[in-house]
Image (spheres, rainbow, N blue to C red):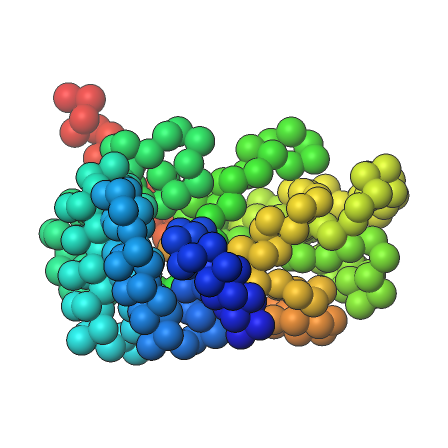
Amino acid sequence: MLFAADAWRKANKIAGNQCMECYEHAIRAYADLGDTKDAVKEAAAMEAAAVTPADKSDAEMQQGRALLFGAGDEKFKPAMLEQAHAALSKAYSTDPTNRPAAFLDGMALARLDRNAEASTAFRAFAEHAPESSAMRLRAKHFAENPELARHKSAPPVVVTTLAGKKFNLDDMHGRVVLVDFWATWCGPCNQELPHMQKLAKKYENDPFEVISISWDSDETKWKDFIAAHNMTWNQYRDTAHTLSTAFHVDAIPHYFTIDSDGVLTAETVGSGSMADSRIDKLVQRAREAQRERGTAMAVAQPAATQ
């Protein structure tokens, strides 16, 4: 990542320090390294070089993003979150069409326990986001319950599975989700296959979903393997490694467990790394929540029909 940041800075220098894309890539590379100081410094240079309001707004948003993620996932740094909010609200003010800045500002405000303001920011994003936006539904959920934005979330996933089903990670309606990165040619993945089959079968009538995301380049081989091994759950082939990049996956098998509130609860790598007891507890909690919702609806129904 440090090499990537240096490479983009050199490319920008060749372009006379006027390459907005170079600035953005360098900022993200520093942020991925956890180097918030250099990310913010690069964003300030980008803002100074910006000519149009859109570029200036983008620079302000990049600074806010770096500060937001630098403030931590669980143990937040309030002072850094305040700085992030200042930069992101400024970005949205500079260019009101910069909707991503509104979403990120919602994240900062939620983590500062400023829930009403956070809801407003998330709604500003959701109301103008296209239907196809992977973040639209997440923003609606966060607007309804900003508490969710204080927890670590998996990247958004909206794909069409092998069976033709639209799979939206933010539309799981109280289900536990196991995200499985694998490939047919991966030995450890094949060792884990019986375990995956067991989980899919065990929880087939429960609020539980599995999505297996393959690194296979050969579509026919992938399809034949799935059919031969009765892999009846959600299947998707990540040909461009788009999802793998979003999840920062560089080795397989690689698993992410997401609870019924959409919170990323575990990330494990390698065969034998999944903890069945953890999944059991999450599914049990999802079952209980499902029963509670059913009871509440049954009680409310007579009143609604009177």
Seen in the picture, residue 33 relative to 303 is either above or below; the reply is: below
- Residue drawn 22% across and 55% down? 88
Give whichever of 56, 17 is nearer the camera.
17
Q: Position of residue 55 (x, y in %)?
A: 30, 47
Q: Is residue 267 shown left or right of residue 239? A: left
Q: Is residue 149 visible?
A: no
Seen in the picture, residue 276 relative to 12 is either above or below; the reply is: below
Q: Position of residue 71 (x, y in %)?
A: 30, 73
Q: Is residue 170 shown left or right of residue 8? A: left
Q: Quadrant of residue 226?
A: top right
Give whichever of 103, 298 is nearer the camera.
103
Q: Position of residue 48 (x, y in %)?
A: 26, 59
Q: Quadrant of residue 42?
A: bottom left
Q: Position of residue 258 (x, y in %)?
A: 49, 59
- Residue drawn 39% across and 53% down? 18
The quarter of the image holding the C terminus is top left
- Residue drawn 39% across and 29% down? 131
- Residue drawn 71% across and 72% down? 270
Give whichever of 195, 116 is nearer the camera.
116
